[in-house]
Amino acid sequence: MTITAQMVKDLRDKTGAGMMDAKKALDENGGDMEKAIDWLRQKGMAKAAKKSGRAAAEGIVMAVTDGKTGVMVEVNTETDFAARNEQFSSFVKSVAELALKAKAGDVDAIGALDFGNGKTVSEQLTEMIATVGENMQLRRAAKLESVSGNVGAYVHMGGKIGVLVSVEGADVGEVARQVAMHVAASNPASLDRDSIDQDALSREKAIYEAQAAESGKPAAVVEKIVDGRVNKYLEEVCLVEQPFVMDPDRKVGKVVSDAKAGAKVSGYVRFALGEGVEKAEDNFAEEVRKAAAGA
């Protein structure tokens, strides 16, 4: 029986097993999902499987760069207690460095990398789940490369926010890092006007049009008001047009070109820890109890 990528994904969702473990389990059991689950449990992964349905919204975002390429990973766990554990933080750092060395920016590709101890990254993560007693997940990853410049990396608040920024131009590593810090603080919606989400822009424009129309002013005046507000909106959300956090008198694009003639920002990626993950609202006392009990 042919083992499809969807079958592997379904098994991973049900058990929390790594990609390679899930594929092997299906191969060994002729594609039978239930038998594959039992096989994983027999191999000592039952504890990890029990945790896989629990929300993991804490953890660490790690961004690293070698100057020309940057890689960022987000590894989640259930509680901040586990996230602050030295073993966990060391694991996340190692994963990011392995991904950078392999130039890998895809979760499955990173999960299949050799962790250096006879296990893959996914297998090592599964072992940590069983040891720590919390659901953990290599949730997402990104890679950014610069053709003729540098990639800057910045991690804020011990891994709550991570940013990669690519700047084209000679010897622009420092300004790339500074722009990464700006992105962490300002959270732009797009790189520039050409890359703005058109649906979001249309919604904003519709709001401005409705507000301006209520003024009772002539259509030509209303149009100018709307154009002015749209322009202001774009200046606020487009990275290269935002006032630079370290020097608000200059826009980000100007700061970059001032640092090196002809230099420009070519891309960025920003991860905020746990964004989009629905987290259970446990009270603090219950969280402490669970951590103490190793639940």
Image (spheres, rainbow, N blue to C red):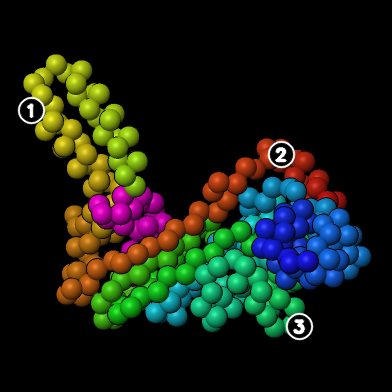
Residue 79 in the magenta stretch? The answer is no
Label 2 secondary element: loop
Is any part of residue 216 visible from this angle? yes
Tag 3 residue: 118
> Going by the image, does 68 lie left or right of 212?
right
Tag 1: residue type? Ala
> Going by the image, does 98 lie left or right of 221?
right
Residue 9 placed where, x, y %? 69, 58
Marks 1 and 2 in Cβ contact (< 8 Å): no
Closer-to-camera residue (41/54): 41
> Going by the image, does 137 lie left or right of 221?
right
Residue 205 placed where, x, y %? 26, 34
Tell me which label, 3 or 1, sits earlier in the chain: 3
- The span shown in magenta is 176-196
Determine crowd level at label 1: few under 14, some 14-19, many 20+ residues with C-alpha closer than 10 A: few
Tag 2 residue: 282
Q: Nearer the viewer, mark 3 or mark 1?
A: 1
> Going by the image, does 40 lie left or right of 178?
right
Tell me the number on the disc at residue 220.
1
Tell me the CA gap for discs 3 and 2. 37 Å
